[in-house]
Amino acid sequence: MSGNRTGVPNPPAIVLADDRIPFPDTDQVLCCRTSPALFQIEDIPNTDQDPRAREKALAKAKHACSGCPIVKDCLKWALANPALTQTGVWAATTKRDRTQLRKQLVARLGEDWVGVVAEQDRLRRERARAVRAVPPTARELALARLELESIPTRPAPYNRWKEPITPAQAASNQRVLALVASGKAA
Ligand code: SF4
């Protein structure tokens, strides 16, 4: 009979996620949300028609994860939540991969490796906040104003100039560069 010693039936077991490692936020469309069945490889049987069906599904799921924008944080979350990730592919890992990785983390960081990783994340966020809190120097501001024709290493959504810069923009660049070179904007 289900129930506890008071006779009150046991509530359904709800497994809560370990909130020390939150699941990463993203606006991007995730393959595991649009095609969850693909990631539930245990449910994909090999058949006479396709004796390698599960292996193929695993390869597809791993490929999808490899292009996922949050794969690193997804893996961290999946490792921190074994009860919630007992099956399926998470961050290109199978259940067996995750068990192995958890053992390695325990060996490296100790039984409370989740706490250690969460603390490392917290310190990293603090450092990033501290860096942002330092106001940019006049030189950095001046350089940021430069209207260059192309900076190939700039990340999206920077739009490269399609047109040559105008004489006014060129003159403005000259002024800013002269200011920087003279050290007045340092
Ligand atoms: S890495 Fe994680 S969030 Fe991304 S597709 Fe794979 S399982 Fe989904």
Image: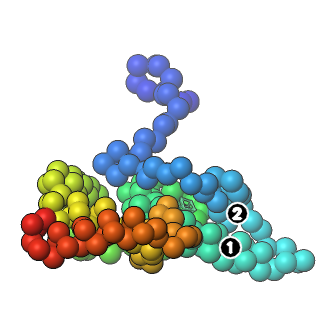
Q: Quadrant of residue 38?
A: bottom right
- In the rendered image, residue 44, in percent from the top left (x then y), is placed at 74, 65
- In the rendered image, residue 111, in percent from the top left (x then y), is placed at 24, 62
Mark number for residue 60? 1
- In the rendered image, residue 103, in percent from the top left (x then y), is placed at 34, 72
Q: Nearer the viewer, residue 164 or 129?
A: 164
Secondary structure at badge 1 equals helix
What residue lies at 24% left-to-right and 67% top-to-bottom?
Answer: 176
| Residue 26 visible | yes
Horizontally, residue 165 falls left or right of residue 171, namely right
Amino acid type at image mark 2: Leu
Residue contact at pointers 1 and 2, CB within 8 angstroms:
yes
Marks 1 and 2, the one that precedes in the sequence: 2
Q: Nearer the viewer, residue 12 or 1?
A: 12
Above or below — where is 55 with respect to 81? below
Amino acid type at image mark 1: Lys
Q: Which residue is mark 2?
A: 38
